[in-house]
């Protein structure tokens, strides 16, 4: 009877310790800080012509959730945004904490044939604003290209904006956001510029290949 009583008492203690351990583990899991990823860009990021759930930032959020990673995507895309307009708008979006910053701007500058030096200066200003507000932020640059009808020199100079800025500012680089989508009719809407839902799935993959390493290093 004595051994039985001691055994039952010990069993209760072990049971309680196990429950306490579970509670502590659950508490720690709930205490994990969710970090914000800001996608700052044009209609390509906003998902022009698509349901918001079909835009590539939303698809990346789905991937993040499936992997149970502690990140929340903020879609800061705006149709028609130029680098100059983005420079004016960024401070408003930086009012919320940002841990990872994905910069997708410049496409509208290129389509308008704006000077490369001007676009470069504006993008650097945006990068500086983000770094100043959040010194520990991880940054990703989305590369862009313009059609050759803009002129061979302009197209080449424009293409080089993005890898040059990425290198200068220690940013991860998505070489070309529209890789495997740009110029493919079935993957673009009728305007030939904005991707379809299927096209945005490829954009999401283009970004994820680079972004996943950034998130894992945070």
Image (tube, helix red, strand yellow):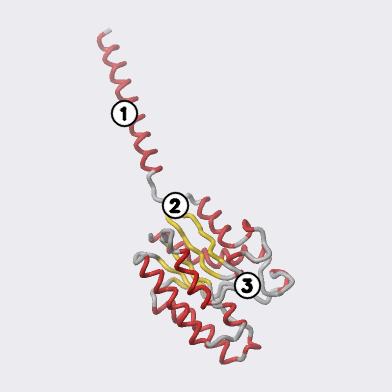
Q: Is residue 98 above or below residue 190?
A: above
Q: Residues within 10 Å of mark 3 (few under 14, many from 20)?
A: few
Percent x, y of residue 26: 39, 38
In this view, which residue lies farthest toward the top? 1
Residue name at image x 61 percent, y 66 percent: 202
Q: Which residue is mark 2?
A: 70
Image check: 63 left or right of 218?
right
- Please state, as top left, top right, bottom left or bottom right, where the C terminus lies in the image: bottom left
**Which element is circle 2 on?**
loop
In the image, is 58 to the left or to the right of 187?
left
Q: Position of residue 5 (x, y in %)?
A: 28, 12
In the picture of the structure, the residue carrying the numbered disc 1 is 17
Callout 2 environment at 10 Å: few (<14), some (14 to 19), or many (20+)? Answer: few
**Whole-percent x, y for residue 180 in the image:** 62, 72
Q: Earlier in the sequence, mark 1 or mark 3?
A: 1
Residue highlighted by disc 3: 180
Above or below, comparing residue 92 to residue 167 in the picture: above
Image quadrant assignment for residue 172: bottom left
């Amino acid at each position: 009877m004595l051994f039985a009583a001691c055994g039952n008492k010990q069993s209760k203690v072990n049971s309680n310790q196990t429950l306490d351990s579970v509670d502590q583990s659950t508490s720690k899991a709930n205490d994990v800080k969710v970090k914000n990823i800001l996608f700052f860009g044009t209609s390509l990021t906003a998902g022009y012509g698509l349901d918001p759930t079909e835009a590539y930032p939303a698809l990346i959020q789905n991937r993040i959730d499936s992997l149970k990673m502690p990140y929340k995507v903020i879609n800061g895309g705006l149709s028609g945004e130029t680098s100059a307009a983005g420079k004016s708008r960024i401070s408003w979006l930086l009012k919320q904490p940002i841990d990872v910053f994905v910069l997708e701007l410049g496409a509208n500058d290129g389509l308008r044939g704006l000077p490369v030096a001007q676009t470069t200066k504006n993008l650097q200003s945006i990068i500086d604003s983000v770094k100043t507000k959040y010194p520990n932020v991880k940054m990703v640059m989305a590369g862009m290209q313009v059609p050759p009808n803009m002129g061979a020199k302009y197209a080449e100079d424009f293409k080089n904006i993005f890898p040059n800025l990425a290198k200068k500012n220690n940013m991860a680089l998505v070489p070309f956001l529209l890789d495997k989508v740009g110029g493919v009719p079935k993957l673009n809407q009728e305007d030939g510029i904005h991707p379809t839902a299927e096209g945005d799935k490829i954009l999401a993959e283009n970004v994820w290949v680079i972004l996943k390493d950034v998130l894992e290093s945070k």
